Every structure is written in structure tokens, then in C-alpha cells.
Image: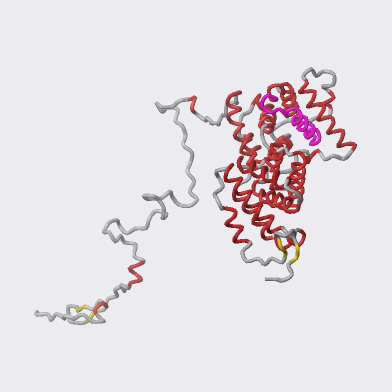
């Protein structure tokens, strides 16, 4: 009865499931292999929880919205619900923008127009105005834009004319534009107090609007014999003259305001600067010269003004031109129309061209040194922005080591021996 038990050590065959029967025979049983791959595919929970069954559809659970493509049904309102309210069923909410009144209209639209003067994008203005509920104030948009442009620069008035042409049709109607110009003509006596040239400028706006086909041609004819205000009469006469000149002489109304300084060709700017200086030498009006220079709207190009002024001094005969240009530069620097940087760049350009200038003006070097010295003394006394020796130190470096072939102190006589 003593059975002999077979004890097997760990070996490569230990996993085969061999055992002994009652009579001592070896019985082989098949045991599924346990490989690493089988462990990866095992669905049994590794946390010791669950029955090892697969998930229902592979979706759901914490932080999961559901399986892809799953559509949830709409929540139905239960009439028997104690919180049921019949007035809240199937409600659609819309954003309502209140119409603008006189005060809010000016506060809202004025910044839009002023920003347009900086970027010049009419489409952006149209989008901003479309978001507002202008209501009855829609016809006041052209009036406000023109009123702001009357106090601005010529380039801003050109932008305003373009803006009215762009807005007419998408935001404004022809009737809105016409009503605005009627109101502007009535308010001219008040506009003249702030802008004395308002009648002439409003006449140009009217002529430009007629040329752009946003104002009917009968607008001016409708006022004939029915105008009592002298300012309105002057504006209408100005518009009629411009339209008549465009038909007879081919005057381009679309270029009535001109273009901004940065958009003009350089050759045109140089011609206007030369014309400005020549008119100043004839009239001697410093205030008018300053106004004309401001209207050019080219503060980055003022070095050209200084350059041309110094060239005129070198090419002139006598002391009158030197005194007048010196007085003009002193006035422009004192009013900060011309900065020290632009003044210095203008003199620097003159020194760079001295090799060519000395051919036509033999005494150009000595004249320029004298003019620089007098200019610096005058500017230091009249303006605190100029430091002593700021120009002369630069000029001494620019002309250092130059060779003189002409006796500049003896009336320009040639030297017999070079040195």
C-alpha cells in the first residue's frame, strides 16, 4: 500500500503538467503556456477587482464622453414637473443693441473716425459702424467725419472723402450724405469760429462728393437764390467753380486735396521745398514759410529743406540770403518744426557734396564754415535744444585734411604752388 511519490525538481519540463497515477504510470496533461505575450492580452484586472470581462463597447467611465458617433436624445420637458414653466419652453434669445442717442453717438463714432485718420482702412470703419445700431443718427456720420476733417490735415480730408465714397451704399445711403451736407451748410457760422477756412473746404468736399457720384448734381442748383448765409454762399460758389473747371479745363477733382507727404514722389517734394524757399526769399514771411512746411507733412524729410537752404546760401551773392535763411532756420528750430537731428543731417549732406559744389562755388568751404559757425551761435542763443559746438565739432571732422587749391581769403585767386 505504500505508494511511491515522484518528486520533480524545477526544470524545463516542470511546466508540462506530468503526474503519477495510482499504478505509478506517468500521465501527461496539457497546460496552456504562460508567455509574456499572453500576459499582455490578459483581460483580467491587475488590481484584483472585476470579473475579467471586457468593457461594454469600450466606452464610458470617468472622464469619457462616450463612444464615437453616439447621439444623445434631446431632453424633453415634463409638463408634470413641479418646476415646469410654460413661458420658458422653446425660447430663443437674441442680442439687442440699443440705438444711439446724440451723446453716445458722438462718443462712440468720434474715436472710430480719428483712428481711421491713422490707419486709413475704410473697410474696418464700415464693419465697426455696421455693429452699431445707428438708427436715426445714421445721417450724422458724414457730418461728424467732415467736421473732424475740417480741423485736421489735408491728407485727413482726402481720407474723409474716400471714406464717404466707400460707406455710401453699404452703410449710408445717398439721402444720408445729402442730408449731412445740408446740415453742414446750416452750421457753417459755428464752424467758422474754429476753422476760418471752413467755407472753402466745405465747398471742396461738396465738389468731391458730386464728382464721386455720392451727391446729386442738382444739390448746388437747389440753393440758387435761396441762400442768405454768406458762408454757405461762399461754400456753394467754391464747389460750383471747381466743378466748372473740371469740365472746361480738365481739373481732376479726385486729387483736390492732394496726397500725404509720405505718398508723394521725392522729386515732387524737392520741387515744393525749392518753391517754398524761393517764395520766402521774395516775401520774407517766416510764419507763412512755417505753415507751408507743416502742410507738406514730411517731418522725416526736413533734412532736404535744410540741405536746399544751405545750397541757396552758398550759391547766393551778398549777405541778404544768408541772414534770411539764418533767421528762418532759427524760427523753425525754436518752434520744433525742424529737429536738431534733421538739421544735422541736412548739413551732413551738404558736406558730402562739397567736392561737386566747390567746382561751381570755389569759396564754398570757407562760406560753409562761416555759415555753420553763425548758425550754431544763433541757435544756441535762441533755442535750448542746441548744444554748443554741436555743429562745428561735426563740421571740423567732415572737412579735416582737405587740400586747398584756391586762396579762399584772397578773393578766390589760384595759388601758384600747391602745399
* Picture coordinates of residue 264, whole percent (x, y): 73, 48
Q: In which quarter of the image is residue 285?
A: top right
* Picture coordinates of residue 179, whole percent (x, y): 73, 25
Seen as rendered, the residue at the extreme left is 1
Residue in the picture at 59% in, 31% down? 108
Query: Which segment did they paint magenta?
Result: 192-214
* Picture coordinates of residue 341, whole percent (x, y): 60, 51
Q: In this view, does 63 lie above or below 174?
A: below
Q: In which quarter of the image is residue 281?
A: top right
Q: Quadrant of residue 279?
A: top right
* Picture coordinates of residue 287, whole percent (x, y): 69, 36
Q: Is 252 on the left or on the right of 106, as rendered? A: right
Task: Specify the quadrant that holds the N terminus.
Answer: bottom left
390 and 85: which one is in front?
Answer: 390
28 and 409: which one is in front?
Answer: 409
Task: Specify the quadrant that holds the C terminus.
Answer: bottom right
Residue in the picture at 48% in, 25% down? 86
Amino acid at each position: 500500500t505504500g505508494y511511491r511519490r515522484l518528486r520533480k525538481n524545477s526544470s524545463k519540463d516542470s511546466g508540462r503538467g506530468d503526474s503519477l497515477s495510482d499504478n505509478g504510470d506517468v500521465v501527461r496533461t496539457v497546460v496552456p503556456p504562460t508567455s509574456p505575450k499572453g500576459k499582455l492580452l490578459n483581460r483580467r484586472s491587475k488590481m484584483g477587482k472585476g470579473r475579467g470581462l471586457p468593457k461594454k463597447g469600450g466606452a464610458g467611465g470617468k472622464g469619457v464622453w462616450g463612444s464615437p458617433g453616439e447621439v444623445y436624445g434631446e431632453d424633453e420637458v415634463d409638463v408634470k414637473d413641479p418646476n415646469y414653466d410654460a413661458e420658458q419652453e422653446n425660447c430663443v434669445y437674441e442680442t439687442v443693441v440699443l440705438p444711439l442717442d446724440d451723446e453716445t453717438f458722438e462718443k462712440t463714432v468720434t474715436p472710430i473716425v480719428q483712428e481711421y485718420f491713422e490707419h486709413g482702412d475704410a473697410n474696418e470703419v464700415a464693419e465697426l459702424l455696421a455693429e452699431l445700431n445707428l438708427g436715426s443718427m445714421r445721417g450724422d456720420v458724414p457730418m461728424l467725419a467732415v467736421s473732424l476733417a475740417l480741423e485736421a490735415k489735408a491728407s485727413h480730408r482726402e481720407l474723409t472723402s474716400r471714406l464717404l465714397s466707400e460707406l455710401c451704399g453699404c452703410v449710408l445711403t445717398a439721402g444720408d450724405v445729402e442730408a449731412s451736407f445740408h446740415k453742414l451748410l446750416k452750421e457753417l457760422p459755428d464752424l467758422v469760429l474754429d476753422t476760418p477756412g471752413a467755407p472753402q473746404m466745405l465747398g471742396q468736399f461738396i465738389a468731391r462728393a458730386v464728382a464721386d457720384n455720392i451727391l446729386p448734381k442738382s444739390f448746388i442748383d437747389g440753393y440758387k437764390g435761396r441762400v442768405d448765409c454768406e458762408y454757405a454762399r461762399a461754400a456753394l460758389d467754391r464747389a460750383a467753380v471747381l466743378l466748372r473747371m473740371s469740365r472746361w479745363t480738365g481739373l481732376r477733382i479726385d486729387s483736390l486735396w492732394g496726397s500725404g507727404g509720405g505718398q508723394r514722389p521725392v522729386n515732387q517734394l524737392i520741387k515744393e521745398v525749392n518753391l517754398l524757399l524761393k517764395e520766402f526769399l521774395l516775401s520774407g514771411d517766416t510764419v507763412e514759410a512755417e505753415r507751408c512746411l507743416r502742410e507738406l507733412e514730411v517731418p522725416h524729410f526736413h533734412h532736404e529743406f535744410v540741405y536746399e537752404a544751405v545750397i541757396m546760401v552758398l550759391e547766393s551773392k551778398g549777405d541778404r540770403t544768408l541772414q534770411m535763411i539764418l533767421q528762418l532756420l532759427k524760427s523753425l528750430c525754436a518752434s520744433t518744426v525742424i529737429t536738431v537731428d534733421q538739421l544735422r543731417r541736412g548739413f551732413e549732406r551738404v558736406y558730402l557734396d562739397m567736392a561737386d559744389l566747390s567746382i561751381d562755388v570755389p569759396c564754398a568751404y570757407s562760406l560753409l564754415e562761416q555759415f555753420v559757425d553763425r548758425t550754431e551761435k544763433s541757435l544756441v542763443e535762441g533755442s535750448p535744444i542746441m548744444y554748443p559746438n554741436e555743429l562745428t565739432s561735426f563740421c571740423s571732422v567732415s572737412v579735416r585734411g582737405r587740400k586747398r587749391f584756391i586762396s579762399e581769403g584772397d578773393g578766390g585767386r589760384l595759388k601758384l604752388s600747391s602745399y
